[in-house]
Image (spheres, rainbow, N blue to C red):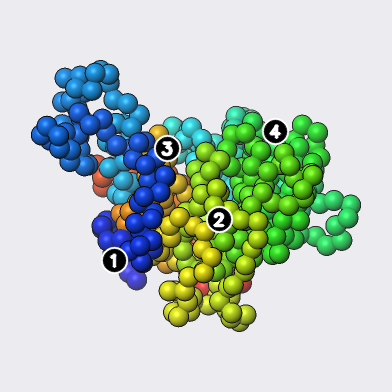
């Protein structure tokens, strides 16, 4: 597709979730629909058109007039009022080029406060950008002992340290807060290695996913040998190793700030919930969530220890409530051992298949999860009340869905290769997408500035679509 046709973002109100009316009704009636409404709906007096009648979304001007007139009796907007206003301003204008590299971008994430942005590339490169200083490069990191690619990065809560992983049992940690901009492993700075293997490990393994705990004292990792590992940074040792799944653990995360619950997703198609408080006595997951027909590429927690979303190689994103988890698992799959998402299209006959024991609350379709471990997220709590979910896609786009209705509300088109990762600023209507074409681009709410994108890619770019992927 030519660049002239690609440089457009689209919005529409056609539903892309579920596919069966009954499923959508269940979705709308679930508790999370009410929670989302409470977090993103205005006070009734600010949204009232005539007595006894509200019209949503409420007019921003009407809400501002109501605030100045103190209609709600609070004299100010509540967090829900603010979310109702801000959530209407989607980051669909762009793109503006933040950076352009000669290797595939695998990871891109804002820090929790939005002041820093981290991007990891296949070519042994990680860059940390200072968002508040015009995207100036704060840290330019050359990775140590890289195998295949940077698979994941994680920034500590205090923004002082960054860990990065590759297809190796060694995680490396580097100081982000130092004054040195160029960080070359063990030349300009020490990249301390954290060994996630144990004495019993005969074969080496890779790490697909790594996350700091909210207190910054631990790391949780998902590995290619079907395990979950927890590393105690204070003691500088591996504190827990769980033989968690029957295949690669592609994604892990903490469920909430307590750090007691861990979510994991694997190529065995299951999401699992682990309670560290009782694992030592039981040795089993707290529960299993069934519904995907193929492997899981990513999991994002809503942060409340109850809800999560997952991207699957069955070309869907699913919403889960861990209170619906079970103790038994049934793995169905496609029944086609020859299908490989890394270089084959998803079979047409499988697009309408449904797991007979699907425990998910809702299913979102439209994007593509092929070639690589595409990531999905809840939209920010502060600005949207988490009323959207968004995901990269192997068709080179970013998709935004309404959490409750399932409608595709925006699609961002620019890239010419799979978009593996994307990140919505925690406070502003700004999103960054990163793709295998090496572009890191910024999207914002439409304003007066025009996006400046070169009409053509740099010369000499060779597309490599049929090589083994990760």
Taking depth in this image into account, of 85 and 125 the one nearest to the observer is 85
Secondary structure of the residue carrying tag 4 is: loop
- Farthest residue, direction right: 199
Total labels: the figure holds 4
Secondary structure of the residue carrying tag 1 is: helix
Inter-mark Cα distance, 2 to 1: 30 Å
Q: Which residue is mark 1?
A: 5
First-in-chain label (1 vs 3): 1
Question: Is there any visible trace of residue 210 in the rendered image?
Answer: no
Residue shown at 15% from the left, 37% from the top: 53
Taking depth in this image into account, of 394 and 178 the one nearest to the observer is 394
Inter-mark Cα distance, 4 to 1: 47 Å
Which quadrant, please, contains the N terminus?
bottom left
Q: Which residue is mark 4?
A: 217
**Label 2 packing within 10 angstroms: few (<14), some (14-19), many (20+):** many
Q: Which residue is mark 3?
A: 381
Indicate the quadrant where residue 141 lies: top right
Q: Which residue is mark 2?
A: 298
Inter-mark Cα distance, 1 to 3: 33 Å
- Nearest to viewer (mark 1 / mark 3): 3
- Nearest to viewer (mark 4 / mark 3): 3
Q: Are marks 3 and 2 in contact (CB under 8 Å)?
A: no
First-in-chain label (3 vs 2): 2
Q: Position of residue 144 (x, y in %)?
A: 72, 49
Secondary structure of the residue carrying tag 3 is: helix
Inter-mark Cα distance, 2 to 4: 23 Å
First-in-chain label (4 vs 3): 4
Inter-mark Cα distance, 3 to 2: 20 Å
Q: Is residue 98 left or right of residue 169?
A: left
First-in-chain label (4 vs 1): 1
């Amino acid at each position: 597709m030519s660049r002239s046709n690609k440089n457009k973002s689209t919005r529409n109100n056609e539903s892309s979730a579920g596919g069966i009316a009954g499923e959508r009704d269940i979705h709308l009636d679930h508790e999370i629909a009410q929670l989302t409404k409470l977090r993103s709906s205005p006070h009734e007096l600010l949204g009232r058109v005539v007595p006894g009648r509200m019209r949503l979304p409420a007019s921003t001007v009407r809400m501002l007039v109501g605030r100045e007139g103190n209609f709600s009796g609070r004299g100010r907007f509540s967090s829900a009022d603010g979310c109702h206003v801000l959530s209407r301003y989607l980051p669909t204008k762009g793109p503006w080029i933040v950076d352009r590299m000669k290797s595939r971008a695998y990871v891109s994430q804002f820090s929790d406060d939005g002041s820093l942005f981290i991007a990891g590339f296949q070519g042994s490169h990680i860059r940390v950008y200072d968002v508040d200083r015009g995207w100036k490069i704060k840290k330019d990191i050359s990775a140590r002992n890289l195998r295949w690619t940077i698979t994941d990065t994680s920034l500590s809560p205090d923004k002082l340290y960054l860990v990065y992983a590759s297809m190796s049992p060694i995680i490396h940690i580097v100081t982000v807060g130092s004054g040195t901009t160029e960080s070359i492993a063990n030349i300009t700075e020490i990249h301390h290695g954290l060994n996630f293997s144990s004495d019993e490990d005969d074969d080496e393994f890779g790490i697909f996913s790594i996350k700091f705990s909210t207190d910054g004292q631990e790391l949780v990792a998902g590995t290619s040998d079907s395990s979950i590992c927890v590393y105690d940074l204070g003691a500088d040792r591996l504190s827990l190793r769980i033989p968690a799944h029957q295949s690669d653990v592609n994604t892990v995360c903490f469920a909430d700030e307590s750090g007691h619950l861990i979510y994991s997703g694997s190529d065995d198609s299951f999401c699992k919930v682990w309670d560290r408080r009782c694992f030592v006595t039981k040795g089993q997951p707290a529960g299993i969530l069934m519904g995907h027909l193929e492997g899981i590429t990513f999991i994002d927690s809503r942060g409340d220890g109850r809800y999560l979303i997952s991207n699957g190689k069955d070309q869907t994103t699913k919403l889960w409530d861990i209170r619906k988890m079970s103790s038994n698992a049934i793995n169905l799959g496609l029944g086609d051992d020859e299908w490989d998402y890394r270089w084959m299209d998803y079979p047409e006959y499988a697009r309408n298949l449904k797991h007979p024991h699907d425990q998910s609350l809702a299913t979102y379709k439209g994007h593509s999860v092929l070639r690589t471990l595409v990531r999905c997220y809840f939209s920010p709590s502060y600005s949207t009340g988490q009323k959207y979910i968004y995901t990269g896609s192997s068709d080179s786009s970013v998709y935004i869905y309404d959490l409750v209705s399932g409608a595709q509300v925006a699609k961002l088109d620019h890239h010419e290769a799979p978009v593996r990762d994307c990140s919505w600023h925690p406070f502003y209507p700004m999103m960054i997408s990163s793709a295998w074409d090496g572009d890191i681009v910024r999207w914002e709410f439409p304003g007066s500035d025009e996006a400046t994108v070169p009409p053509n890619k740099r010369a000499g770019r060779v597309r490599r679509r049929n090589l083994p992927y990760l």
